[in-house]
Every structure is written in structure tokens, then in C-alpha cells.
Amino acid sequence: MSEIEGIYAVWLREAKIYTREKERLISSVISPLLWIFAFGAGVGSTVNVISGYSYQVFIYPGIAVMAVLFTSLFYGVYIIWDRKLDFLKEVLVAPVSRASVFAGKMLGGATDAMMQGIFLLIIGIFIGVPLTPLVLIQAFLMLLLISIAMVSIGLVIGANLNSPEGFSLVINFVMWPMFFFSGALFPVSNLPAWLAGVTALNPLTYGVDALRGIILGINQFPIYYDAAIMLVFAMIAMGAGILGFRRM
Amino acid sequence: MVIKTEALTKKYGKLTAVDQLNLEVEEGEIFGLLGPNGAGKTTLISMLCTILKPTSGRAWVNGFDIVKEASKVRKSIGIVFQQPSVDDLLTGRENLAMHNLLFGVPRELRKQRIDEVLSIVNLEKRADDLVNTYSGGMRRRLELARGIMHHPKILFLDEPTLGLDPQTREHIWEYIQELAEKECMTVMLTTHYMEEAEQLCDRVAIIDYGKIVVLDSPQALKNKIAGDVVKLKQQNPDIDSLRKLDYVKNVQEKDGLLYLSIKDASKHLQDLLTHTGPIDFVEVRSGTLNDVFLHYTGREIREAEAEGGFWERVMKR
């Protein structure tokens, strides 16, 4: 019981701060809009229709994953600031387990990322993405799973680094390859062999594939297979996160 | 015994911050750890609070082993850190509410406890403002309120009045004393302010280089090295002959000045001056813990501090 209250306490703090920092809210709305409208519509004007969908709609699931990926990974930097400013000390000396502290932080980050996810799903309705209520729920759950995995990765990195500058350096090496080799911007069905190999090793590929399957019905792997891989990946990431917090 | 350590040691590489320390603190005591920065006070407290693991040795807080039963130790203690650790982006009340959840205060008591501690530290009116609008003293009071809200058996205070103005400092002393009495709490505090140790503590341990140099009540410590201190300036002092005087307890020479600890200066000063011969300067005052520190370590606490002073720490942030 007290562990659950501990998780709630840490999550509540994150949620309150999220709603108080207007910059976070605004930036999380603007960047996906740019991708969908500027990039999607721009490239879409020269690229042919892919699998029966306009390019803008085709990359929509990829953009949604990207927005969640970026926000989730970058969330790890807050743990460095918390430590620098000593706010975390109070939480670390409390009689709650480190696993609970991690869970609270992780859920806080996932909340942050999913606010953006929800916003993107709403935009999807307006740009002609075929979203039925059932699809919306499935897409939401898939994005949540991706977010949980990626927030955990961000927190692992944050727990092991001491400077915010170092964090952005490291996170760029994680974030961009994950994004580019995930098939978020192109179909993975007819890639050259080396690229196909790299994308197959990237866990995010399965997240993108699942979401595209759920929303557009285009998927290379069965959805349960995608979801299982993401689930295992999320579990490993959470385990690493708890270990990282124990050593903090 | 509420706190007990046995050969407790913490090493950072070659540096031994806390060195084979043995200590016992009784229930209900206000116990002071006095020493310059870098003496190992904070390291000692951090180990007792289970933030740091000792390199060797053992310790018990409220009867629980600090390594094997860390979570039980944490439930029995309240901590006020040296550096402020209240959350800037939350209000005072929200900080306290979060603490209630983290420390498992029963639901039905939460609101009452928050109001109670807010009134103890006089923060009721600002409770719903964001902490980043608080002054340094107010933050400190909020932390104190937070530290006692779950009614800990033992309260650890690491430099509770560092960097505060004298008025606020005295207020905080009052709060601490009141609390210790009302809640029957044991308080362990670190300080490098002599007045703080003298005013607040039942017993004081003077710590230097990770070891306890001496431990007693502030009064007994002062008595040990005599009631009064005479500061003298003289061209060619004859220290050996001064040492032989029966009312002189100790003589130390520092920066061309002589510091004599003597019994009852009002009675013996005249006689003393006949022995010293002509002098350039004399000052007489009653002894303080600073003299005790000087007596045992050969340094004044203020110069010891130059090794890692307050400003240095502020600038680092």
C-alpha cells in the first residue's frame, strides 16, 4: 500500500510540474504539427501514393511514434536536474523502494509523452486518417507501451550521467538511429539487405509496424508479434531503470 | 541508546572522511556534532540516514542496523539536509503533502499534520505559494516542518541555520528546542557555529579529521579548559614560566599572540600581568566552545574552514 502511495506521490509531482511548465506543453504541440504538415505535406507532393495512402497519411503512424519517442527519451534529463538541485534527495531517503521511485518517475514521463500522443491522435482524425474508436484505443495502448520503454531508456541514461549536456549528446546517439532505422518514414518491405538487417534489430521498428498495422492495416509482421517484442523490450528497459535507480 | 556506532568508517579513495568512530546518543538528547567543514560531520550523518554506505564498522539507529534494515531506519528518522531540498516548483503545502505520501502518514491524519507543522513554523499564510517565491529562512522552516511531520523518533539536522540571518537562526533554535521537548524527539545536528552548539545541545562532540576529539556537555567542555581566556601581545614572551603558574591551565601561541586559559580572570589577572612584564595588548573574555576547539585541535574553527568555506560551496552550485 505504501509503495503504491509512493509511486503516486512521485507521479503526482511530475504531473503537476508538467501542467505548470507552459514551454513543455507548447513545444510538445508544435513539433509534431511541423512534421505532419510541413514534412508530410511537402514530401507528399512529390512522392507517389504508398499502399493506397497519401504520404502524409502513410507517415502519420511514424510521426506519432517519433513524437512519443523524442519526448520519452528526453524526459530522462529531468532526473539529472532533480539530482543537481537536490530535489530528489527527499525522495531517495523516503522509506519507499527505488523500484517505486522509478515507477513514479517513469509513469510521470509516460504521462508527459502520452499527452502529446493523444493530441496527435486527435489531429489524425482531422487529416483523414481512418481512426475508428477501437483503432484509437489500440493505437493509444501501443503508443503507451512504446513510451514506457523509451522513458525507461531515458531514465537509465539520466541515472548514469551527471550533466545535462552529456545527456543530450548521448541521447542523440540513441534517438536518431532508432528513429531513422525504424521505418517511420518509409516502408520496410523492399529495403536493401543491410538496411533491412539494421531495422530488424531495432525494437522501435516493431512499434512503428504495429501502429501502422493498427491504423492503416499495413504491417510486415503480425501485430501480436510486434506487441510481444515491444513488451519484452519495455520489461528489459524497466529492469535496467530500476537497477540504475538503486545505484543512484 | 537511540544511536550507536561501532568503529564506523567511511573512506573516499585515500581520504578517510569518518575514521573508526564510536558514538552513543541517548533518547531525548539534543546532540551536536561540531567541527569545521570537511571534518566528516555530514558524511557521518549521511551514513546514519542510510544515504551512504559505510566502508567498515556498524551503526544502529532506533535499534535498526543502518545497512541491513535501512528501510526501518528511514521510517524512524526525519532529515533536514544542508542544501535545500524542497521542491521549488510545488507550493509549500504540496511539498508537505508529497512527504506525507512518501512517509506513509495515515490518510486520516494527513491534513491535520500539515496544518500542525505549518503553524509550528509560522508558514500558514504562505503555504499555498510556490516555494520559489520563498526567502531562504522560509525554505529552511518549510524543511524543518517537513522533517518532523511524520513524527520521527530521531531528527537529523545538517547545518540547520547555515547562511541564515541571526534573527531567523534564533527562531529556528526555538523551534528545534520546542519540538524536541514536545515530541520527545532525539535531535542530532551538525554545526560549525559555536553559539548554536552552546545554546541548543545537551552534549557536543567535537569532530576533526573524522574522529571525535572530545565529547561532553558544552558547559563541561568549557570548564575543562578553564573559565576565561586572556589574549596577550608581547615582544618576547616567556611561555615556560607562565605555564608554571597554578591558575594557568593552558598556553598557546598563535600569530604572535598568546592565548592563556586561566581560572577566574578577575582574581588572577593582576598577578598574571606582574609575571608577564610589559605588554602591548591584552584582552580578557570568558571561554567559549571556540576556545575548546582551539585547545583540542590547535586551530580556530574559522581558519579550519578556509579549506572549504561556505562561499565556495555556494559558488559551486
Image (tube, rainbow, N blue to C red):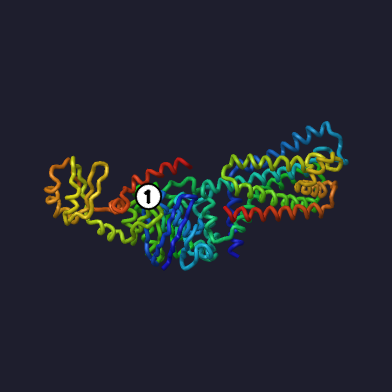
User: How many numbered markers are drawn?
Assistant: 1
Q: What x and y, as percent, mark residue B75?
A: 51, 64
Residue B167 position within the rendered picture, expressed as x and y whole percent measured from the top left: 34, 49
Dot 1: element: loop
Q: Position of residue A190 (x, y in %)?
A: 86, 40
Please give the name of the residue rendered at 12% of the width and 51% of the height, measured from the top-left corner: B271
Kindly indicate the quadrant of the structure image that contains residue A180. top right
Answer few, some or many: residues within 10 Å of disc 1's Cα (few below 14, many 20 plus, some between 14 and 19): many
Which residue carries the number 1 mark?
A: B36
| Residue A105 visible in the current orientation | yes
Q: The residue under label 1 is which amino acid type? A: Pro
| Residue found at x 54% / y 48% | A83
Chain to which mark 1 belongs: B
Residue toward you, A103 or A130: A103
Q: Is residue A126 visible?
A: no
Residue B299: x %, y % from top left = 32, 48
Q: Quadrant of residue B176?
A: bottom left
| Nearer the observer, A184 or B130 | A184
Tell me if residue B145 comes above or below residue A38 in the rendering. below
Quarter that holds the N terminus of chain B = bottom left
Q: Nearer the viewer, residue B73 or A136?
A: B73
